[in-house]
Image: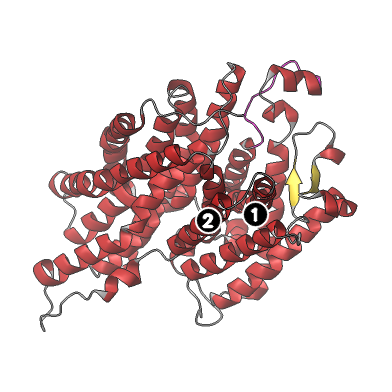
Amino acid sequence: MTEAILSRTTASQPSLTEDWLAVVLGLLVFALAVGSFLGVDLLGWAVTTSVWTDFSKALAPAAKAYSSLGGAGALAVTFFALLTVLSVGAVALGADVKKFIPAFAVVFALSYASWILGSYASLAVVTPADQAKFGLSWSLKLTNEGGFLIALVAGLIIANFFPRFADWLKEAIRPELYIKIAIVILGAFIAVTAAGKLTLASSLLLRGLAAIVEAYLIYWSVVYFVARKYFGFSREWAAPLASGISICGVAAAISTGGAIRARPQVAVLVSSLVVVFAVIEVLVLPFVAQIFLSHEPLVAAAWLGLAVKTDGAAVAAGGITDALIVAKNAAEGINYQPGWILATTATVKVFIDVFIGVWAFILAYVWTNHVNVAAGGEKAKISEIWQRFPKFILGFIATFAIGLTLALHSDAQSLPRLTAAIGQANVFRVIFFILTFFSIGVLSNFRKLWEDGLGKLAAVYFVSLFGFVIWVGLLISWLFFSGVKPPLVG
């Protein structure tokens, strides 16, 4: 199923890569948000979802200026706006737009329905005051971000019980695209949030450098050694497997496979395995973090950034953990500002992502010059760094830099407007998160993946992840983030 990520039957040759499309669409949302900040409300029609018991009050436009739309109208406008823009993007990617349009309509409907259901008060409310407000005697206390889990489970049900339906949806099942767009938008959210807490933000950035040392110098070498020494894998299999487990999942496996000229099926199988374990980690690790690390929230955040190996799953797991830990502390009277756990997870993951291109170049150089030396003595080229560099990171950097500049130059009157404008952009980040969760679920047909020969690969992944990667990640996260707390509300 992960072949849907790596290669699709397309109607034409793509004119734009997925990374560059994510940059374009993420910057488009950000630009519209800046327009709202400058006085032209261009995103206020976007639909937002509140915690609800009365369904008629669940949906509303993001800005009061568009209140005449109503919740249903805002949902319809949001859907058609996304459908239009993403259909153009599908054409640019060379996809079959006739298949994409109906598939995306269903993907959006099921994903957003999951978000609405996750916002039901009995699932979402956290504090005793909120329970009293809705007349509830109990709640699962998931916050409305429990909708992410519902979307994931919905996707898993489709993948494993309705495989023909999952196959029909595949043209719109693009988790890497959705999460990359979300991360580009996230840059602005992090920037505006960080502007008032520069000391902590700087600390997070510096501590995030530890992720590079761990992922590249510790994780990769150990996993490669285990795969070669104890499981007998060839270099062609061991290198992409080590990158997939230790660095950045699908993107790293693909980059490494290309760098060492591995057969295409190597990256396909490794990437499939990464998706399966990412699902397991998303379902388990946020709740483990809530139980054992609620009083060290940024340790939990960094841990997830180091342990979960795909962009989508890592950032999404950070979002769930943010909601769970903030809610648990709020129940104890400690009111952390939301977003800092997610921001830390994303920061750690971004530091790792940034160096995928460099790592691919190093592997390309070693393989072409020392392992599989070409007959003509072909040498690795510097341009391979740029070819392997994850371009969506440029969008993240751009929105972060511009957002931070705007925030630092805003006075007491304009800063709330900027915060509100970026909040409108954040609506779309949430939507793309939901689409990512649902898509990851749909790609996870466990039976088919097992039949494709993942047993031995899964053994390496299991031993490495649960026997080494998670625990070293926790140790390093504790060493660098212990005692560092998110700012309190107010």
The quarter of the picture where residue 361 lies is bottom left
Q: Position of residue 343 (x, y in %)?
A: 49, 43
Q: Is 392 a magenta residue?
A: no
Q: Which region shows up in magenta?
A: 134-144
Q: Residue at x 25, y 51 (%)?
A: 242
Q: Nearer the viewer, residue 18 or 294?
A: 294
Q: Nearer the viewer, residue 41 or 478?
A: 41
Image side of residue 355 versus residue 341, left or right: left
- Do labels 1 and 2 touch, CB within 8 Å? no
The mark lying in front, picked from 1 and 2, is: 2
Q: Which residue is mark 2?
A: 405
Relative to 225, is 482 above or below?
above
Q: CA distance from mark 1 to mark 2?
A: 17 Å
Crowding at label 1, few (<14), some or many (≥20) Cα neighbours within 10 Å?
many
Crowding at label 2, few (<14), some or many (≥20) Cα neighbours within 10 Å?
some
Q: Nearer the viewer, residue 220 or 279?
A: 220
Q: Which residue is mark 1?
A: 425
